[in-house]
Amino acid sequence: MPAGHRRATRTGHTAGVQPRHGYLDAPPPLAFAHRGGAADGDENTAAAFARAIDLGYRYVETDVHATADGVAVIFHDPTLRRVTGEPGRIADLRWSDLASVRVGGAAVVPRLDEVLAAWPEVRFNVDVKADGGVEPTVATISRTGAADRVLLASFSDARLTRLRALAGPKVATSLGMRGVARIRMASLHGRSLRLPPSVVAAQVPPRYGRIPVVDRRFVAYCHRLGLQVHVWTIDEPAQMHHLLDLGVDGIMTDHVGVLRDVYRSRGHWAA
């Protein structure tokens, strides 16, 4: 099936493109548990991932930093303060320091290799949050044999360039902010674009500030490029329905129960 050919799926949803990477081996629209489902009070922990996966989520969005001794760990912020109330930068601490960090008695900083090993059937959308995390993240993916079930993401186009160079085309990637802006402008003006071969999805918010991103034109243009469109972070049912009506291929949410119910109501929930 050529890129851009559209095919019908459950209950009338139309997928934009046939998946060309193992990461995208489920029929769209995909449901992503953002940070494992942050609305439940914790985020990016083994407990959060387990809750989402028990609900039936097969796609989990998460974040990675690297410790001072080069261990890729699951954490969103550069410091511990917001989550734990304690000072300390992830990049300045060793893994042995982080392994003992607890909130309410539960560990809050898992290792990336531990998470990949714990759920071998789950696809992880990994946002590499700092330059120091690039090499440890790619090394972990290689060591664990997880190349076909990880997508590497970043807001930074330069960081994504490094990730692609180290990981090679077998590891799926999305686009940084400049890459998304290029696609948006190209969609408005009918220009052609060439993208790195590992790019399989545009992962975007509905808008950047006052500038709209996701509309029918943008979705159709991405589909013509062979890209899926995944939208973050969507927590309201009405907005979920609107985006699905536009034909997006995935939604990321903090409210994993809400997105599951919306997908069920439309016949999209495969779990």
Image (cartoon, helix red, strand yellow):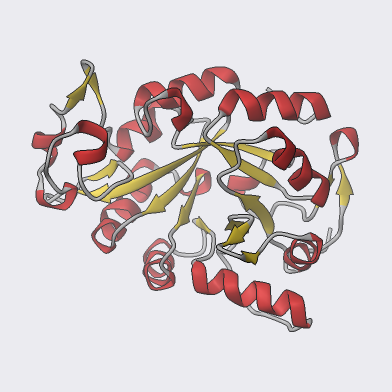
Residue depicted at x 31% and y 59%: 134
Tally the marks.
0
Most foreground residue, 136 or 262: 262
Q: Examine the rendered structure and indicate whether residue 212 appears above or below residue 29.
A: below
Residue depicted at x 64% and y 55%: 206
Seen in the image, is 116 located left or right of residue 209? left
Q: Is residue 8 visible?
A: yes
Most foreground residue, 80 or 145: 80
> In the picture, which quadrant includes the N terminus?
bottom right
Residue depicted at x 70% and y 23%: 261
Answer with the quarter of the image where residue 135 lies.
bottom left
Q: Is residue 269 visible?
A: no
Residue depicted at x 83% and y 45%: 245
Answer with the quarter of the image where residue 115 lies.
top left
Q: Examine the rendered structure and indicate whether residue 98 appears above or below residue 107.
A: below
* Percent x, y of residue 251: 64, 43
> In the picture, which quadrant includes the C terminus?
top right
* Percent x, y of residue 189: 76, 83
Answer with the quarter of the image where residue 223 lies.
bottom right
Most foreground residue, 36 or 160: 36
Q: Examine the rendered structure and indicate whether residue 12 appears above or below residue 19.
A: above
Seen in the image, is 43 located left or right of residue 257? left
Seen in the image, is 59 located left or right of residue 88? right
Q: Examine the rendered structure and indicate whether residue 251 appears above or below residue 213.
A: above
* Percent x, y of residue 254: 52, 34
Seen in the image, is 186 located left or right of residue 252? right
The residue most toward the front is 210
